[in-house]
């Protein structure tokens, strides 16, 4: 009898400790649900367990952004943000959900969402701190509002117009107008140029690239969550807005890195992935900006915006020469009908190369073939 019990116990232990796969939104037996959506320990455990990006979570996030930003429906957006988070908790989803909850007047829940975005390392931090200050001010918790507003400015928030006019801060201004202005000026005393400060915070998130830099199809693996560019930085990424001037939420935007910086300008590379359009391969842009973040010049150097265009592969060398190889791609199935996923490339036909140089003033100039082949 004891042998039988030992056998049964062994089987049970083996079954309990055997290999298993974590479900979406779960880790080591802990599952993320709407009831523990704001539990820091649970969220961190589930977030740390999920290594790969979840496509369903990303798709739901983009749908939520569209509903919130373009269709102006925060209630439906919150429901979609929560679905995205339950599939995979991400800092950006909690942050945007906090914004939508604030628009609904659900201030305390909005603050909870911001808190989780913070522990998941949302960037830019100054925007998160500013939005928390706004919700605290609206809820009448003025001491906390002041605390977070000062922190936001110290971490690089420099939109002086918002600070002076944002209705969310009305209670803070009305409480003591003189001290409010003094608070702002004291906090901003380290930066006489808010636009320059905001640009510095954004641009310094782009780390120096390693040369030679090859932007081919395999480079898409580098487009990870920690490289995502927040929608709050749309002033520096023109592709974030479509031609009708509404927010383009069909794409994901990623930092690639810093190419060059001098006293007058910085040259950056970023990637755009058209998630909603079905093209999972990034399109890469190189762009130069002056010291206040004003665009000087921009060039598409990698990928393919539309099917009829050549596919571009860029190589950038340490002397800032840009070589763009153009290819005609043929897919196994028609991408217009079948999409790009699970649709292998059947052939790549070379179509020639283009060569560019980066001038000292930040402009990109095309070189002739002879110079390009040096």
Image: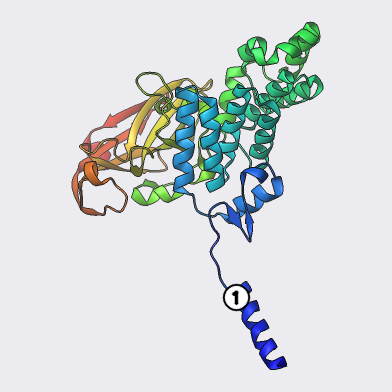
**Location of the N terminus (image quadrant):** bottom right
* Residue at 68%, 21% in the rendered image: 134
The colour style of the image is rainbow
Residue occupying the point 53% across, 20% down? 292
Residue in view at x 34 percent, y 49 percent: 217
Based on the displayed image, in which of its 4 quarters is residue 120 positioned?
A: top right
Indicate the position of residue 146 as horizontal and vertical percent values.
77, 21
The residue labelled by disc 1 is 15
| SS at mark 1 in the image | helix
Which residue does the image show at 52% across and 27% down from the upper left?
233
Viewer can see residue 327: no
Task: Tell me the quarter of the image containing the C terminus.
Answer: top left
Percent of width and height locating residue 222 = 45, 48
For residue 327, what is the image quadrant? top left
Image quadrant where residue 12 sits = bottom right
The residue nearer to you, when weighing 123 against 288, is: 123
Answer with left or right where residue 55 lies relative to residue 187: left
Residue 242 position, x and y percent, is 37, 24
Of 200 and 81, nearer the camera is 81
Q: Nearer the viewer, residue 371 or 234?
A: 234
Above or below, 144 relative to 278 = above
């Amino acid at each position: 009898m004891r042998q039988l019990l030992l056998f049964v116990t062994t089987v049970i232990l083996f079954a309990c400790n055997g290999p298993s796969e974590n479900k979406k939104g779960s880790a080591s037996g802990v599952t993320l649900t709407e009831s523990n959506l704001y539990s820091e320990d649970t969220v961190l455990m589930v977030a740390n367990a999920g290594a790969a990006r979840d496509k369903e979570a990303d798709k739901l996030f983009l749908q939520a952004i569209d509903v919130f930003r373009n269709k102006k429906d925060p209630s439906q957006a919150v429901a979609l943000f929560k679905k995205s988070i339950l599939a995979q908790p991400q800092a950006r989803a909690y942050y945007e959900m906090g914004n939508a909850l604030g628009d609904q007047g659900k201030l305390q829940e909005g603050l909870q969402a911001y808190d989780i975005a913070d522990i998941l390392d949302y960037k830019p931090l100054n925007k998160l701190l500013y939005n928390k200050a706004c919700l605290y001010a609206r809820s009448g918790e003025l001491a906390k509002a002041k605390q977070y507003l000062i922190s936001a400015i110290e971490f690089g928030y420099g939109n002086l117009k918002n600070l002076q006019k944002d209705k969310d801060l009305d209670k803070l201004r009305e409480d003591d107008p003189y001290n409010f202005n003094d608070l702002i000026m004291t906090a901003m005393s380290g930066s006489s140029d808010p636009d320059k400060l905001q640009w510095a915070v954004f641009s310094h998130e782009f780390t120096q690239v390693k040369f030679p830099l090859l932007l081919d199809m395999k480079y898409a693996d580098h487009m990870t969550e920690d490289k995502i560019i927040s929608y709050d930085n749309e002033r520096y990424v023109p592709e974030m807005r479509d031609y009708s001037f509404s927010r383009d939420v069909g794409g994901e935007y990623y930092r690639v890195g810093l190419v060059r910086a001098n006293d007058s300008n910085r040259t950056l590379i970023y990637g755009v992935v058209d998630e909603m359009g079905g093209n999972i391969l990034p399109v890469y842009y190189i762009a130069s900006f002056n010291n206040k973040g004003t665009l000087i010049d921009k060039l598409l150097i990698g990928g393919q915006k539309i099917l009829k265009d050549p596919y571009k592969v860029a190589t950038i060398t340490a002397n800032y020469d840009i070589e763009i190889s153009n290819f005609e791609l043929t897919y196994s199935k028609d991408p217009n009908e079948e999409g790009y996923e699970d649709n292998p490339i059947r052939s790549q036909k070379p179509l020639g190369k283009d060569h560019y140089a980066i001038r000292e003033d930040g402009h990109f100039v095309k070189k002739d073939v002879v110079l390009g082949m040096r």
